[in-house]
Image (tube, rainbow, N blue to C red):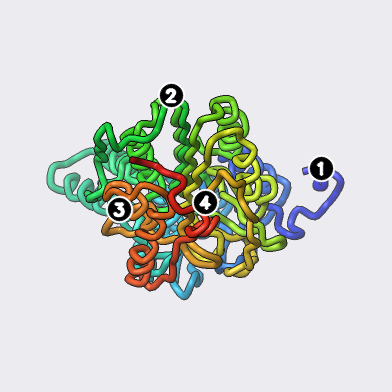
């Protein structure tokens, strides 16, 4: 705004586009968009060029939210029914609202008469695509729920003389239900053979001083979902408790609790203050990873992370390994169900960057530390709708349930299983272990 006060052109380089796309705080974004429009910013630039072909600013607003920004643009004359091409699909603003999980925006756009047929046709496209498939399936379920409830309300009104107020209440109830359906914790559970872990007392290894940090981020503030990461992390906590970790020694960060500042506080303040010389530390992360396109450095992406500004909003693997390696403890086990290629799965990429960035090795780890990860190199970490878990996490926990005790043994067990499941999804995925299994045979136990 300082540049605008100094006389800069409000439409040069489209600062309104930047505000709509990149600002992550809804109230701040709404005020900024309103101020820019009041200063003369064009609410409907000719064409918004992005790597993915959003086409129009209203589409980005619908996907990123909040609904107040969508309303501002439409109130200024923007046509929400404008169509564009996105990954070879014909789309409109309602498609982006639904696939982005923006329930209030989807409801508003339906009220404004945006063509639901165009949105539904796009949401039914690419069901098996690694990136679009999960977004489109989730968006299809959301929009179908809204449409079904609206149709039911209209039918009830026609047959029973229901008032307009009653119709609004019925539709609002559908919106509330759709909002809950978007929350990972409200999703219909997939029954799995690894649920409800039970171990005998003789099989429990964790002692009073052993610590677990478990991070699962499925619903991001401003990024696509990481499917099943929420449930995976919750189940990992159940396994940790079943294996003897004390509740007071488990820190669980899920979704909005897993901000960058919370991750920093947990790993760099809470954890060092909790450990003792004989502690075993277990750290699990499920969520998006991202590569820095310039340096190739790999980052974990917190709930409020932005792949365009990883140096300030991400948490690098190099930093993670360095901080854990400095802990004065017996040993550290790190399990990562993420990937860093930027080409899909549990990975995101900076705007304008090309997928398959060459990711720089995070380096060797401390002698008392091991890292078992879902992928190697530029591979994609995938999830299974049938199993209701990331396939790495599923087999990692299944290995424990089936009696595998140490990390090298678990790695040898899960590697071929993960590879086979990934092939069924048309994905190449092979877990990695650092250091390699032959150098740590018999070490890093999780159970007796």
The residue lying at 61 percent from left, 44 percent from top is 320
Q: Which residue is mark 2?
A: 248
Lower position in the chain sequence, tag 4 or tag 3: 4
Q: Is residue 413 left or right of residue 5?
A: left
Q: Which residue is mark 1?
A: 2
Q: Quadrant of residue 197?
A: top left
Q: Are marks 2 and 1 in contact (CB under 8 Å)?
A: no
Q: How many marks?
A: 4
Q: Secondary structure at mark 2?
A: helix
Tell me, yes or no, if residue 180 can be seen here.
yes
Label 3, label 1: how far apart the Cα atoms are? 49 Å
Q: Nearer the viewer, mark 4 or mark 3?
A: 4
Crowd class of label 2 (few under 14; some 14 to 19; many from 20; radius 10 Å)? few
Label 4, label 3: how far apart the Cα atoms are? 24 Å
Q: Are marks 2 and 3 in contact (CB under 8 Å)?
A: no
The residue lying at 54 percent from left, 54 percent from top is 289
Q: Secondary structure at mark 3?
A: loop
Lower position in the chain sequence, tag 1 or tag 4: 1
Instruction: Identify the disc placed on residue 199.
Output: none
Query: Where residue 14 sits: x, y (%)?
Result: 70, 58
Q: Is residue 303 left or right of residue 117?
A: right
User: Can you say whether 16 is above or below 275 in the image?
Assistant: below
The residue lying at 61 percent from left, 46 percent from top is 366
The residue lying toward the viewer, choosing from 31 and 163, is 31
> In what quadrant of the picture does the C terminus appear?
top left
Q: Is residue 204 left or right of residue 250?
A: left
Lower position in the chain sequence, tag 3 or tag 1: 1
Label 1, label 4: how far apart the Cα atoms are? 47 Å
Q: Nearer the viewer, mark 1 or mark 4?
A: 4
Q: Residue furthest right?
A: 6
Q: Which residue is mark 3?
A: 388
Q: Are marks 4 and 3 in contact (CB under 8 Å)?
A: no
């Amino acid at each position: 705004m300082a540049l605008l006060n100094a006389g800069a052109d409000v439409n040069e380089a489209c600062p309104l586009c930047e505000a709509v796309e990149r600002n992550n705080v809804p109230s701040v974004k709404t005020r900024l968009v309103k101020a820019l429009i009041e200063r003369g910013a064009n609410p409907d630039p000719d064409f918004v060029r992005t790597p993915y072909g959003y086409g129009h600013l209203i589409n980005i607003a619908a996907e990123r939210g909040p609904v107040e920004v969508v309303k501002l643009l439409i109130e200024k004359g923007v046509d929400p029914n404008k169509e564009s091409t996105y990954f070879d699909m014909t789309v409109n603003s309602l498609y982006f609202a639904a696939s982005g999980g923006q329930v209030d925006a989807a409801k508003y756009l339906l009220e404004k008469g945006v063509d639901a047929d165009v949105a539904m046709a796009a949401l039914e496209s690419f069901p098996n695509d690694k990136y679009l498939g999960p977004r489109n399936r989730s968006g299809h379920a959301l929009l179908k729920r809204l449409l079904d409830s609206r149709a039911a309300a209209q039918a009830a009104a026609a047959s029973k003389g229901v008032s307009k107020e009653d119709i609004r209440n019925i539709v609002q109830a559908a919106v509330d239900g759709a909002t809950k359906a978007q929350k990972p914790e409200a999703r219909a559970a997939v029954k799995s053979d690894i649920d409800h872990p039970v171990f005998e007392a003789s099989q429990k290894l964790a002692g009073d001083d052993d610590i677990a940090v478990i991070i699962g981020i499925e619903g991001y503030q401003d990024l696509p979902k990481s499917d099943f990461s929420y449930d995976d992390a919750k189940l990992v906590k159940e396994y940790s408790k079943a294996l003897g970790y004390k509740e007071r020694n488990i820190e669980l960060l899920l979704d909005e609790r897993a901000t960058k500042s919370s991750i920093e506080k947990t790993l760099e303040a809470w954890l060092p203050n909790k450990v003792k010389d004989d502690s075993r530390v277990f750290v699990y992360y499920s969520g998006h990873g991202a590569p820095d396109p310039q340096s190739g450095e790999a980052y974990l992406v917190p709930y409020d992370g932005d792949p365009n500004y990883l140096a300030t909003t991400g948490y690098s693997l190099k930093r993670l390994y360095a901080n854990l390696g400095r802990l004065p403890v017996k040993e550290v086990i790190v399990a990562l169900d993420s990937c860093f290629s930027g080409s899909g799965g549990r990975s995101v990429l900076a705007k304008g960057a090309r997928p398959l960035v060459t990711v720089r090795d995070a380096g060797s780890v401390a002698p008392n530390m091991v890292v078992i990860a879902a992928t190697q190199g530029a591979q994609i970490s995938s999830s299974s709708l049938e199993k209701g878990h990331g396939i790495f996490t599923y087999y990692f926990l299944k290995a424990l349930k089936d009696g595998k005790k140490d990390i090298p043994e678990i790695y040898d067990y899960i590697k071929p299983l993960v590879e086979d499941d990934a092939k069924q999804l048309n994905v190449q995925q092979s877990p990695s272990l650092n250091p390699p299994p032959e150098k740590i045979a018999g070490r890093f136990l999780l159970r007796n």
